[in-house]
Amino acid sequence: MRHDPTALMIFAAGLGTRMGALTASKPKPLIEVAGRPLVDHALELAESAGIETVIANLHYLADQLAAHLGPRGVILSDEREKLLETGGGLRNALPLLGNGPVFTLNSDAVWTGANPLEQLRSQWQPDRMDALLLLVPREAARGHGGQGDFILDSEGRLARGPGLVYSGAQIIKTEGLHAITDEVFSLNRLWDRMMSEGRLFGIVHPGGWCDVGDPRGITLAEALLAGENDV
């Protein structure tokens, strides 16, 4: 089994309800930010990082996404019949991803600075980590209104708590998915198990990040990409 990730799962199946009318007839990954669909920003990161195997899951208005992603060489994981959430969706895509750890990336964020996938790859230590999450300081998390998700200790291990926001990018080992019997579940289930064993780690992204979860997020993301400082 390989120990370093070579494939990427892009989560693109969500309903995008917080986008309101913008997603009434278009899936959120195709909403444009700075003149390009959100999912294309994610694909650019994958291409820049040299990741050749890219899988995306589909559910809401799946035909539109398939028409957009298919010509780009993205392999499609079909969830048309049932939305499986992040954990169930990743497990459903394992036959396409292969064995060993994988990158995952949410399709509803934009980044500046270091490529998040390359940053994760450079810090991945499979002998001591079951997952490595990329985090953003709460004060630097544009478009995100929460108090944060994790606390980072001096060795890089994660605990639940306010402070650092999960960015939607990670490397994760997938073997533990098979021990979860539910069909639909969040990756939080697997993270909690890894955390209890001291094998959930995190690093902090030094550049910019914006969650594009609602129409205001589009404006904030475009300002970020334009180099504007106001959050």
Image (tube, helix red, strand yellow):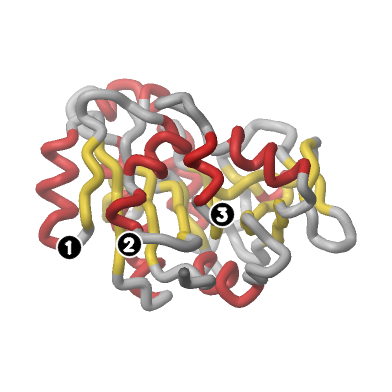
- Measured as percent of width and height from the top left, residue 98 is found at 35, 60
Q: Amino acid at mark 2?
A: Leu
Cα gap from disc 3 to disc 1, whole angstroms: 25 Å
- Measured as percent of width and height from the top left, residue 52 is found at 30, 72
Q: Residue at x 67, y 66 (%)?
A: 206
SS type, badge 2:
helix
Q: Which mark is residue 43?
A: 2
**Which residue is identified by label 1?**
72
Q: Amino acid at mark 1?
A: Arg
Count the marks: how many? 3
- Measured as percent of width and height from the top left, residue 181 is found at 48, 27
Residue 123 in view in this figure:
yes
Q: Nearer the viewer, residue 203 or 229?
A: 203
Cα gap from disc 1 to disc 2, whole angstroms: 9 Å
Does the CB distance between marks 3 and 1 fall below 8 Å? no
**Which residue is identified by label 3?**
209
SS type, badge 3:
strand
Q: Residue at x 41, y 70 (%)?
A: 6
Q: Amino acid at mark 3?
A: Trp
Q: Nearer the viewer, residue 105 or 112?
A: 105
* Apparent side of residue 191 relative to residue 184 in the rendered image (left or right): right
* Apparent side of residue 184 relative to residue 66 in the rendered image (left or right): right
